[in-house]
């Protein structure tokens, strides 16, 4: 008996110990509940919104990528585990016992053996107590649910992407989706021919979706609802998003002090990401971009394989993810600490354009105003520098848009109408001049992007990433400061 009590005490102590020193600043269960209600208020009568958790994605063989929840699913639930389903109903429903409810969540069950290998699970009861759901069930129960989906005027969901695997688990995401498709009449079609008889266009061998036979299934409107909700941040969200941005800005500051021509692109990446981890960031919000010289002309360059950056400009587009929310901050700095005359002219032109773009971030302005403002200044500047012939000349020196929402996604959903208070968007003009461009060779290999995360307020824009210097003179000044990493040496390896 004493041994039994000793084991119980050990297990309880282990649980308490495991729960110590954990982050406490995640979004509250009240936030997620309020967001579900906000969605419900947008939904048409007699409708249900269906959300599936993100798929577990395989890296190689028996190793999976670190799991990351679908942003919409996390936004509405706070649940961070796979193999789950959320149902949000427009009106109160009743079960066979007369109990009313307007939402249900099905989650992976507690499993002592599985948790020993892959980590603790909330289970149905933990989802109730931790996340505030009243109707939470094991996911296997979804396979036996008696919901009459065909009785709703609309069953709303995102299109399936066919990126989930069938595992040995009998209630994994594959089984949950398969059951839902069978239950609702939702069908997928793969054909080797293009059908002209059924008014559908199916791409050969691509597994694209055909309009489901069940007329009440809608795979479009839910994206619109979620974009409307997520484009304006709540106070709780802004705290986490601001922290992610400030962490990213500190990463930019530290590399400005540590940078030298002998560094590799991947070492630069590592310093940024080390700073993120020191501040408690769980992940990067997207693959880190560190491009020196010509590599900076590749907009989403993620090889980061150059072994020495030498005297190039180094474009660094990175963002910390903190409790789900990701920053998106870019700085471009001279590896040797001093802009060359040509580098400085391009850099200062991009800075001037960004200042105009940030100024355009005013409540009531069209979001596209930042693009108009930055492209005008860049085109005028490129003419002045002799890189293009006229402001109306077509070119690829500034090939991307200037602003996008950030939040749970680095490219957060939004409807892209007018600026509203508590939106957070990037302003990121750039100039990229690859080798072989139709201009003087002295400009070749110069790539500059400056990107900041801007909070929209009634009193004007606030630059959340402003702690990282933007002016060329301020960058050069900071690069003269000592870095604590300067004396960090590792032994040579053969």
Image (cartoon, rainbow, N blue to C red):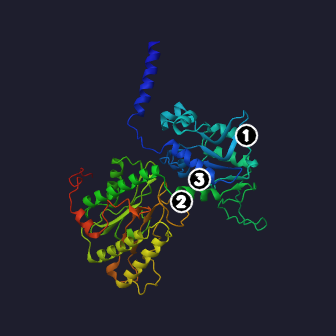
Question: Given contact means CB atoms under 8 Å apart, are the residues at marks 2 and 3 in contact?
Answer: no
Marks 2 and 3 sit apart, C-alpha to C-alpha, by 21 Å
Which residue is depicted at the point 47% across and 56% down? 407
Could you tell me residue 446's position as x and y percent?
Answer: 35, 74
Q: Nearer the viewer, residue 122 or 464?
A: 464
Compared to 487, does 20 lie above or below?
A: above
Q: Secondary structure at mark 3?
A: loop
- Residue picked out by circle 1: 146
Marks 1 and 2 sit apart, C-alpha to C-alpha, by 33 Å
The numbered dot on residue 374 is: none
Classify residue 227 as left or right of residue 182: left
Q: Secondary structure at mark 2?
A: loop
- Residue picked out by circle 2: 413
Q: Quadrant of residue 376?
A: bottom left
**Residue 56 visible, this orientation:** no
Q: Nearer the viewer, residue 458 or 392?
A: 458
Which residue is depicted at the point 33% across and 51% down? 274
Which comes sooner in the sequence, label 1 or label 2? 1
Could you tell me residue 55's position as x and y percent?
Answer: 56, 48
Compared to 248, does 364 lie above or below?
A: below
- Mark 3, other Cα within 10 Å: few <14 / some 14–19 / many ≥20: few
The extreme top residue here reads: 1
Which comes sooner in the sequence, label 2 or label 3? 3
The extreme front residue here reads: 459
- Residue picked out by circle 3: 163
Classify residue 314 as left or right of residue 177: left
Compared to 130, does 460 lie above or below?
A: below
Q: Report how many numbered discs are placed on residues in the image.
A: 3
Q: Secondary structure at mark 1?
A: loop
Compared to 101, does 266 lie above or below?
A: below
The extreme bottom residue here reads: 389
């Amino acid at each position: 008996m004493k041994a039994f009590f000793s084991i119980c005490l050990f297990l309880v102590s282990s649980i308490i110990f495991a729960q110590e020193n954990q982050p406490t600043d995640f979004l509250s269960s009240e936030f997620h509940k309020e967001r579900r209600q906000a969605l419900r208020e947008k939904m048409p009568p007699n409708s249900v919104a269906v959300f599936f958790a993100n798929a577990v994605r395989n890296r190689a063989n028996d190793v999976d990528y670190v799991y990351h929840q679908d942003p919409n699913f996390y936004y509405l639930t706070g649940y961070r585990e796979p193999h789950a389903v959320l149902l949000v109903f427009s009106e109160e429903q009743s079960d066979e016992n007369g109990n009313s409810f307007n939402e249900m969540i099905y989650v992976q069950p507690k499993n002592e053996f599985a948790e020993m290998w892959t980590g603790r699970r909330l289970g149905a009861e933990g989802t109730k107590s931790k996340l505030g759901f009243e109707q939470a069930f094991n996911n296997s129960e979804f396979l036996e649910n008696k919901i009459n989906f065909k009785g709703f005027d609309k069953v709303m969901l995102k299109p399936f992407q066919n990126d989930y695997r069938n595992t040995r688990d009998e209630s994994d995401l594959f089984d949950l989706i398969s059951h839902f498709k069978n239950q609702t009449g939702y069908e997928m079609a793969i054909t080797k021919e293009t059908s002209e008889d059924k008014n559908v266009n199916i791409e050969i061998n691509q597994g694209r979706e055909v309009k489901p036979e069940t007329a009440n299934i809608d795979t479009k409107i839910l994206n619109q609802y979620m974009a409307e909700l997520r484009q304006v941040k709540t106070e709780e969200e802004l705290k986490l998003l601001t922290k992610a941005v400030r962490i990213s800005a500190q990463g930019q500051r530290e590399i400005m002090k540590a940078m030298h021509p002998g560094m590799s692109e991947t070492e630069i990446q590592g310093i940024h990401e080390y700073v993120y981890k020191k501040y408690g960031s769980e992940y990067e919000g997207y693959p880190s971009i560190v491009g020196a010289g010509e590599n900076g002309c590749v907009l989403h360059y993620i090889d980061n394989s150059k072994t020495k950056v030498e005297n190039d400009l180094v474009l660094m587009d990175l963002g910390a993810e903190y409790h789900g929310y990701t920053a998106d901050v870019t700085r471009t700095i001279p590896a040797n600490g001093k802009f060359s005359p040509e580098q400085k002219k391009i850099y200062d032109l991009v800075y001037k354009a960004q200042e105009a773009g940030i100024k355009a971030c005013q409540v009531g302005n069209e979001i596209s105003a930042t693009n108009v403002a930055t492209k005008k200044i860049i085109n005028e500047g490129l003419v002045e520098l002799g890189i293009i012939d006229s402001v109306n000349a077509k070119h690829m020196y500034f090939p991307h848009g200037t602003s996008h929402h950030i939040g749970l996604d680095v490219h957060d959903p939004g409807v892209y109408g007018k600026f509203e208070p508590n939106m957070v968007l990037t302003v990121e003009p750039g100039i990229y001049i690859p080798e072989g461009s139709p201009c003087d060779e002295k400009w070749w290999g110069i790539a500059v992007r400056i990107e900041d995360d801007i909070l929209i307020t009634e009193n004007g824009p606030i630059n959340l990433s402003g702690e990282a210097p933007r002016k060329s003179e301020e960058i050069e000044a900071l690069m003269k400061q000592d870095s604590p990493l300067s004396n960090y040496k590792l032994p040579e390896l053969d």
